[in-house]
Amino acid sequence: MMNERGTCEIDTVAFHGGKAYYIDIQQNIVICDLNTGSDPSPRCAPIFFACSVVNKLCRCPRLHPVCGVHLAVCNGELLLVVLYYWGSHPSPAEAYKPVWTPNQRLELHERVRDLGDHSLFVGRGDTFALSAKEFPVIKRNCIYYAGIACNKPYWISVFHLESDAVEEIPYMEKLKEGRTNRTPYAWFCPRKPFLKQS
């Protein structure tokens, strides 16, 4: 299911509408149509240079470096999530509805500011949405992100889409090892506790 040019690493994968979407480490997007009928091999269409499209989103006089680009499915819609390096951009996280043009280009129009009762969870390699109604401990209309390859003094960031406010969750003491902090790599959400309380 890889692009014919190949890739050294897949950064994020999302499945939506019978298609698999992946972004590689160079922020190239590849769309694979899984509805190929009797042909077992999916048809893949590369959409190159997502990074250049993302870099044009900001209208500031200086370039704000992008920390990560991810795809997520939320409320039945495919979203592109852009993360900026901490302190370099007025909004450290943004979400957009991607538009694919017939000539295999990516366009990003209006920024998504309302996820309804959902929030997005972004890690390295995984991105998904959860409902605050189903999981009341999470805050609605936020982007939770972890595992961003930056040297940051906190464990997880929670970005509130409506207010553009960032909430930083500090490292848990039990995860610290001297001066070293364990960076979270991925999210997972068990429906039940693994261990029974005694």
Image: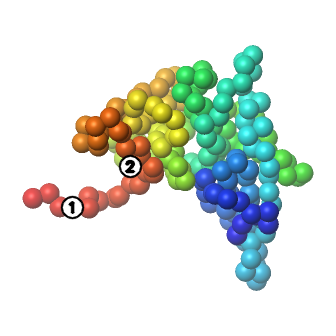
- The reply to whether residue 119 is in sight is no
The image shows residue 84, relative to residue 23, as above or below, that is: above
Q: Nearer the viewer, residue 123 or 115?
A: 123
At 54% from the left edge and 27% from the top edge, which residue is drawn? 86
At 50% from the left edge and 47% from the top edge, which residue is drawn? 123
The residue wearing badge 2 is: 134
In which quarter of the view is residue 108 placed? Answer: top right
- Check disc 1 and give the amino acid type: Leu
The residue wearing badge 1 is: 195
Label 1: which secondary element: loop
- Check disc 2 and give the amino acid type: Glu
- The reply to whether residue 98 is in sight is yes
Q: Nearer the viewer, residue 196 or 62?
A: 62
Q: Position of residue 30 (x, y in %)?
A: 74, 57
Q: Which label sits on residue 118?
A: none
- Cβ–Cβ below 8 Å for labels 2 and 1? no
